[in-house]
Image (spheres, grey):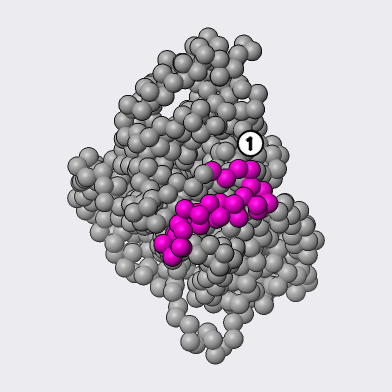
């Protein structure tokens, strides 16, 4: 793969105008297809789970009870100023509003609160039902706005009108502000990292190309497949983050080569062949993990997984084709200026190598241009090429920042050590203590996850000022929380001797169950011998007691069949939420096992080590657990939630844990590969395990830190979303990347490698012979540019 990518990078560099034209044509084609075949107006936010009991009942209701089979809205009338909704003037105003609502687009039926007896005990609140024969996704773009306008006439002195209900649930969220914030923060971080606005702009530009292609391409499919607004936002979020990060890794390697005298074309080709190989590997792991979400069997989740996978795949293609073309246009202008901070930093990385070893493997000259000699005048170069302490045990060192070797043969920080290396030296000084501190702190953060409750979001978590949130809270307060999530029981009475009596007995049996507030009168369809029974729980839709009630009705179906001859199915939005959560819970452990097993296999192939994959898997589990604990603490327990706009607590989105597993797995592999591959390269060259750990920090620490900060910033920018699900996903990914990059990869990993030393890179000979050599770092491409002597001699204070 490195050889192929090397040729591809050189070809793109030479044919840069054609490559740029090709990508411009792809973006234009995606825009044209979106305009012709799809668009945001066709996004589908409906939750469904084919084959589940709730979905089978909904499918049958489309023919047996069409007015109940679609989505529904609530019109909440609240009398103020001491009045009651039953007062003649107020009731007349309500009836007039309901008549207007009946003429709103796509409305199938309006149920008056005076007929359904949905009036609060104190007479101040009345709730009307508006039923549609289509799901929320099939509503016309202005249907709900027209409904609001139709009833606005009743919103006068002495009465307030709020419109809510499941038709408003999971509404599309606006994310354009998040895009701008994320790109702006990323540009600032890149500018600080490279010290050049031109260099910083290249990853942003290429990432935007990839995101535009992915998003417009996905939207062009909305006319034929179901894609939710959350799937679109997730693809945008991940595509932007990985697009910038992947370009950052390649541009950073390219700039290093330029700083040490390599020609731009050779440098770009080598950067794509080396760093690009790691990009392809890391990107494919994300694609595989996200595509794996399709096996769960939930269309909503499938669309999210495929949309995100497509965005990542396009980001990889952009990084390996368009990026080297852009580097060709930039030419030598990306080379750090002589004497600049950026040049000193690049030279410090090259010159402060773990053993002052150049790209050709030769020891660099000392300050005098000669081999470093011991105090007795003997040459102290080892036979393997690594630096060796003098036989007198004294430190062999120059005063100019070149490599220093202690009496134990380990690297000692010189003037060229950057901040990442100094941090690695700190955490590896007492590696066991570091491990204990990391495990204890992440364990404490993960503790709340043991009480995590999962459910689909409802209007109870909508923005506090929104009409649907006000209606939700008012209904829960005045009529009981169960009115916000009624259950629908579909009874098949075709095998009963008296269908009407059978339906009534089913209703009576359900009414006797715990947590049931009221049971409505059965609505029968004599032609199909079915009856529909509405059940109002005592508890809220997301309350565990409501899930227990759903399961209780289903568990009693055998007794109901024996007593009445009727079969029953439980459905409705609340039952669908229960089924989705159950399905995801059952899939979570197997999916986690597959993801962790895949990580072990991939890292075994890349690093040819047993300790490195096991350490990576353990760190991944720690970061996942800690992230879930943080999510529970903020969104379920309410700790610090006000800082990110969370004004009410509630359950965690059912989709979040499995999405977090898939996304964080791939992103964790990014940092693992880019950081540890440098360590392995150093260890194979020097045989110095601790020096190799420090070398990894010196060469990759700054870039990994910048990449993690960029990705965290992009995810955190989406916390401004009004969608609770998207807000939870954004927080989880931002926290997960932050914890995984800085606590696991930059602290836990070096501590484990320092503790295991040579054993970290050991692999049984029989296994080593059987494993293919993936050559992720592109060793077979030949040596990188030799570091000039001045690079080893120039002191640097760059961090």
Residue 298 appears in which quarter of the rendering?
Answer: bottom left
Q: Quadrant of the N terminus?
A: bottom left
Residue 457 appears in which quarter of the rendering?
Answer: top right
In the rendered image of this protein, does residue 638 appear above or below residue 402? above
Verify whether residue 508 appears in magenta: yes
Q: Residue at 74% across / 57% down in the picture?
A: 443
Residue 4 appears in which quarter of the rendering?
Answer: bottom left
Measured from the top left, where is residue 379 in percent x and y?
A: 65, 73
Q: Residue at 55% across / 32% down in the picture?
A: 118
Measured from the top left, where is residue 529 in percent x and y?
A: 39, 57
Q: Residues within 10 Å of mark 1 (few under 14, many from 20)?
A: some
Work out whether residue 384 or residue 175 is closer to the camera in this orientation and state it.
175
Q: Is residue 793 left or right of residue 452?
A: left
Magenta residues, start to end: 491-520
In the rendered image of this protein, does residue 474 appear above or below residue 688? above
- For label 1, the residue is 480
In the rendered image of this protein, does residue 464 appear above or below residue 355? above
- In the rendered image, is residue 361 in sight? yes
Work out whether residue 365 or residue 687 is closer to the camera in this orientation and state it.
687
Which residue ends up furthest to the front in the rendered image? 497
Work out whether residue 556 or residue 226 is closer to the camera in this orientation and state it.
556
Measured from the top left, where is residue 343 in percent x and y?
A: 50, 45
């Amino acid at each position: 793969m490195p050889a192929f990518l090397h040729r591809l990078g050189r070809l793109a560099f030479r044919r840069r105008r054609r490559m740029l034209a090709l990508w411009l044509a792809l973006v234009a084609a995606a825009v044209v297809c979106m305009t012709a075949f799809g668009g945001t107006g066709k996004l589908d936010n409906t939750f469904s789970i084919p084959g589940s009991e709730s979905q089978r009942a909904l499918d049958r209701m489309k023919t047996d009870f069409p007015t109940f089979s679609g989505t529904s809205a609530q019109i909440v009338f609240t009398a103020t100023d001491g009045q009651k909704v039953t007062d003649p003037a107020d009731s007349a105003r309500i009836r007039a509003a309901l008549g207007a609502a009946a003429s709103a687009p796509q409305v199938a039926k309006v149920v008056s609160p005076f007929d359904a007896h949905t009036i609060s005990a104190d007479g101040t609140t009345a709730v009307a039902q508006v039923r549609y024969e289509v799901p929320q996704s099939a509503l016309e773009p202005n249907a709900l706005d027209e409904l609001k306008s139709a009833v606005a006439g009743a919103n006068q002195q002495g009465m307030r009108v709020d419109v809510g209900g499941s038709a408003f649930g999971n509404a599309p969220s606006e994310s354009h502000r998040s895009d701008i914030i994320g790109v702006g923060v990323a540009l600032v971080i890149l500018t600080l990292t490279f010290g050049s606005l031109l260099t910083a702009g290249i990853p942003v530009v290429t990432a935007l190309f990839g995101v535009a292609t992915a998003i417009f391409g996905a939207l062009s499919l909305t006319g034929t497949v179901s894609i939710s607004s959350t799937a679109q936002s997730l693809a945008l979020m991940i595509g932007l983050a990985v697009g910038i990060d992947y370009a950052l890794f390649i541009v950073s390697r390219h700039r290093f080569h330029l700083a040490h005298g390599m020609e731009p074309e050779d440098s770009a080709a080598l950067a794509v062949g080396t760093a690009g190989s790691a990009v392809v590997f890391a990107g494919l792991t994300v694609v595989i993990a996200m595509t794996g979400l399709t096996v769960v069997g939930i269309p909503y989740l499938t669309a999210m997984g495929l949309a995100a996978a497509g965005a990542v795949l396009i980001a990889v293609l952009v990084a390996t084709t368009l990026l080297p073309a852009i580097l060709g246009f930039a030419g030598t202008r990306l080379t750090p200026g002589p004497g600049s901070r950026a040049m000193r930093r690049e030279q410090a990385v090259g010159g402060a190598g773990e053993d002052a070893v150049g790209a050709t493997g030769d020891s660099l000259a000392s300050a005098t241009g000669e081999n470093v000699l011991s105090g007795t005048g003997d040459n102290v170069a080892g036979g393997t090429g690594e630096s060796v302490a003098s036989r007198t045990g004294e430190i062999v060192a120059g005063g100019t920042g070149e490599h220093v070797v202690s009496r134990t043969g380990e690297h000692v920080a010189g003037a060229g050590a950057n901040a990442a290396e100094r941090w690695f030296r700190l955490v590896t000084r007492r590696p066991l203590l570091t491990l204990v501190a990391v495990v204890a702190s992440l364990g404490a953060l993960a503790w709340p996850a043991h009480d995590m409750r999962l459910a689909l979001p409802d209007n109870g978590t909508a923005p506090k000022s929104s009409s649907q949130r006000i209606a939700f809270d008012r209904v829960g307060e005045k009529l009981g929380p169960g009115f916000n999530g009624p259950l629908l029981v579909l009874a098949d009475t075709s095998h009963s001797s008296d269908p009407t009596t059978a339906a009534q007995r089913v209703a009576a049996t359900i009414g006797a169950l715990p947590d049931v507030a009221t049971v409505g009168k059965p609505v029968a369809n004599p032609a199909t011998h079915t009856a529909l029974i509405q059940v109002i729980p005592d508890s809220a839709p997301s309350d565990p007691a409501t899930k227990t009630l759903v399961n209780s009705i289903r568990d009693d179906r055998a007794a109901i069949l024996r007593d009445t001859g009727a079969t029953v199915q439980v459905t409705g939005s609340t039952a669908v939420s229960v089924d989705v959560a159950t399905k995801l819970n059952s899939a979570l452990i197997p999916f986690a096992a597959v993801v962790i097993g895949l990580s072990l296999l991939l890292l075994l192939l890349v690093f040819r080590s047993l300790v490195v994959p096991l350490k990576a898997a353990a760190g991944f589990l720690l970061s996942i657990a800690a992230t879930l604990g943080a999510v529970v603490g903020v969104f379920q327990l309410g700790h610090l939630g006000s800082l990110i706009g969370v004004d009410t607590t509630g359950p965690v989105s059912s989709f979040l844990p499995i999405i977090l597993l898939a996304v964080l797995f791939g992103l964790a592999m990014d940092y693992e590969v880019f950081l540890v591959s440098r360590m392995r390269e150093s260890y194979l060259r020097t045989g110095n395990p601790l020096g190799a750990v420090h070398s990894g920090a010196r060469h990759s620490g700054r870039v990994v830190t910048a990449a993690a900060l960029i990705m965290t910033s992009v995810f955190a920018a989406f916390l401004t979303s009004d969608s609770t699900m998207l807000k939870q996903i954004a927080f989880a990914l931002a926290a997960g990347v932050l914890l995984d990059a800085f606590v696991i990869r930059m602290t836990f990993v070096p501590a484990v490698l320092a503790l295991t030393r040579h054993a970290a890179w050991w692999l049984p000979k029989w296994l080593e012979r059987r494993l293919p050599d993936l050559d992720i770092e592109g060793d077979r491409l030949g040596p990188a540019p030799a570091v000039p002597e001045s690079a080893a001699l120039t002191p640097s204070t760059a961090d």
